[in-house]
Amino acid sequence: MKLIIDIPEEVKADIDNGIVRKHIDKIFLAMANGTPIPDNATNGDVIKAMFPKAYVDDYDYGKDPVIDVYGIDDTEYVTFRKAWWNAQYQKGGK
């Protein structure tokens, strides 16, 4: 299982410079509050994990099936191509 964590920029800068012990409590807190991503997750699984209250609606327009996701931030909805939604998640879009 993977874990998505949010680390404040000043902490990341110190970690990049080898200063870890100073922020160990913030690092553990970020890990405890992280979003778990299951093994073999799809892009859609990651979106759903990051926005658990979002509503997902599946539309099949023949050649161009899409997924609309409602409840992400302040937008009305976000549309994803179904092929991308069902593709294997790869960190950093590799």
Image (cartoon, grey):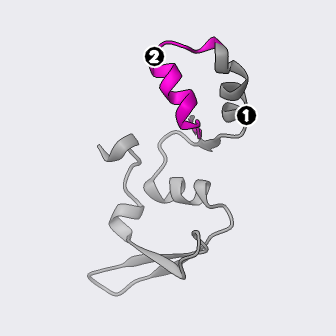
Q: Is residue 62 above or below residue 52?
A: below
Helix, strand or loop at label 2? It is loop
Q: Is residue 83 above or below residue 87?
A: below
In percent of width and height, residue 46 lies at: 52, 53
Three-letter amino acid code at disc 1?
Ala
Part of the protein shown in magenta: 3-21
Q: Is residue 5 above or below residue 67?
A: above
Helix, strand or loop at label 1? It is helix
**In terms of depth relative to the viewer, which is nearer, 75 or 36?**
75
> Which residue lies most toward the bottom here?
61
- The mark lying in front, picked from 1 and 2, is 2
Mark 2 — residue?
A: 17
Location of the N terminus (image quadrant): top right
In percent of width and height, residue 66 lies at: 39, 77
Q: Is residue 4 magenta?
A: yes
In percent of width and height, residue 73 lies at: 58, 69
Three-letter amino acid code at disc 2?
Asn
Q: Residue at x 47, y 42 (%)?
A: 40
**In terms of depth relative to the viewer, which is nearer, 73 or 36?**
73
Q: Earlier in the sequence, mark 1 or mark 2?
A: 2
Q: Residues within 10 Å of mark 1 (few under 14, many from 20)?
A: few
Q: Residues within 10 Å of mark 2 (few under 14, many from 20)?
A: few
Q: Residue at x 45, y 16 (%)?
A: 17
Dividing the picture into quarters, in which one does residue 70 lie?
A: bottom right
Q: Is residue 74 above or below residue 10?
A: below
Residue 32: assigned label: 1
